[in-house]
């Protein structure tokens, strides 16, 4: 099994690599589902990644996956930047207003990515499609190498039956990578039930920062002086299942 860790920092990449992860999905804005990270962060993560594949999320904003022409131009430019930065791949997904996969635009991004030798993952926009099994065929047509999905449910345990069926139907044509709500406590059940080859998760824990002074007049100090960070022990527990 190959483990992909979703990260939003340089430190997260270092922890994921030292803990034995195979690949990272590099994002910004995880509280809103992830957006494209900064060029500086992309560069630094690629520099430290020696035994780690780096895939970058191409998503110009939070919200739905129906993009304007201007947003699509931004996504194209971001894919090209990732190629010049030396990334191994990108993660993207686009839908039409009726919930079908936007095959034409997805093909364009895949074409650009392949010009730089990068792979492409279709992300959980897949779970917002109007027919997961038709969406599977559509994504295969675009040339993506894998799909990140929870089976159309909030988490992988609720969606495990659909995930099993998707993996079975996909066969060797594309990789189905379950993700959303994966923990060391449920990963083994998911692996055994679905027969998955790859697994995705954030595997994070809240850490307290090192600030000594905390303004007593501001509300929610626990949010201002703490942060989520990739947890090495959680990653190792899953890898060693």
Image: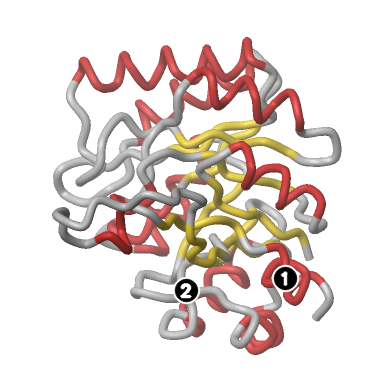
Between residue 224 and residue 10, name the one nearer to us. Answer: 224
Please indicate, yes or no, whether residue 125 appears anywhere in the rendered image: no
Q: Is the residue marked by circle 1 packed among few (<14), some (14-19), or many (20+) residues within 10 Å?
A: some
**Which residue position holds label 2?**
181
Please indicate, yes or no, whether residue 63 appears anywhere in the rendered image: yes
Between residue 171 and residue 61, name the one nearer to us. Answer: 61
Residue 187, relative to residue 51: is it above or below? below
Image point (45%, 48%), residue name: 211
Quick one: label 2 or label 1, which is nearer the N terminus? 2
For the residues bearing labels 2 and 1, Cβ distance under 8 angstroms: no
Q: Position of residue 109 (x, y in %)?
A: 46, 24
Which image quadrant is residue 101 in? top left
Left or right side of 188 for 208: left
Image point (36%, 27%), residue name: 104
Between residue 171 and residue 157, name the one nearer to us. Answer: 157
- Disc 2 to disc 1, C-alpha distance: 17 Å
Assign a secondary structure to mark 2.
loop
Query: How many discs mark residues in the rendered view?
Result: 2
Assign a secondary structure to mark 1.
helix
Left or right side of 203 for 75: left
Q: Position of residue 201 (x, y in %)?
A: 56, 63
Q: Position of residue 79 (x, y in %)?
A: 49, 20
Image point (20%, 18%), residue name: 69
Q: Is the residue marked by circle 2 packed among few (<14), some (14-19), or many (20+) residues within 10 Å?
A: some
Q: Where is residue 240 in the image (x, y as percent from the top left)?
A: 84, 76
Position of the N terminus by quadrant: bottom right
Residue 89, relative to residue 136: is it above or below? above
Position of the C terminus by quadrant: bottom right
**Which residue position holds label 1?**
233
């Amino acid at each position: 099994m190959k483990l992909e860790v979703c990260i939003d920092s340089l430190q997260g990449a270092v922890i994921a690599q030292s803990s034995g992860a195979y690949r990272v999905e590099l994002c910004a804005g995880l509280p809103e589902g992830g957006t494209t990270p900064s060029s500086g962060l992309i560069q630094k993560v690629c520099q430290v990644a020696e035994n780690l594949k780096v895939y970058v999320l191409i998503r110009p904003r939070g919200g739905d996956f129906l993009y304007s022409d201007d947003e699509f131009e931004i996504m194209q430019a971001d894919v090209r930047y990732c190629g010049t930065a030396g990334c191994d791949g990108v993660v993207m997904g686009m839908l039409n207003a009726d919930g079908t996969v936007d095959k034409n635009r997805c093909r364009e991004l895949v074409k650009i990515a392949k010009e730089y030798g990068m792979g492409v993952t279709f992300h959980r926009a897949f779970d917002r499609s109007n027919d997961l099994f038709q969406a599977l065929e559509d994504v295969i047509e675009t040339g993506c190498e894998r799909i990140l999905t929870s089976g159309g449910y909030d988490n992988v345990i609720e969606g495990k039956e659909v995930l099993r069926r998707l993996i079975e139907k996909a066969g060797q044509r594309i990789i189905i990578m379950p993700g959303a709500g994966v923990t060391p406590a449920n990963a083994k059940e998911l692996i055994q039930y679905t027969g998955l080859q790859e697994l995705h998760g954030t595997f994070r824990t809240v850490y307290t920062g090192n600030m000594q002074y905390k303004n007593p007049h501001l509300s929610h100090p626990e949010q201002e002086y703490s942060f989520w960070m990739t947890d090495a022990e959680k990653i190792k527990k899953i890898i060693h299942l």
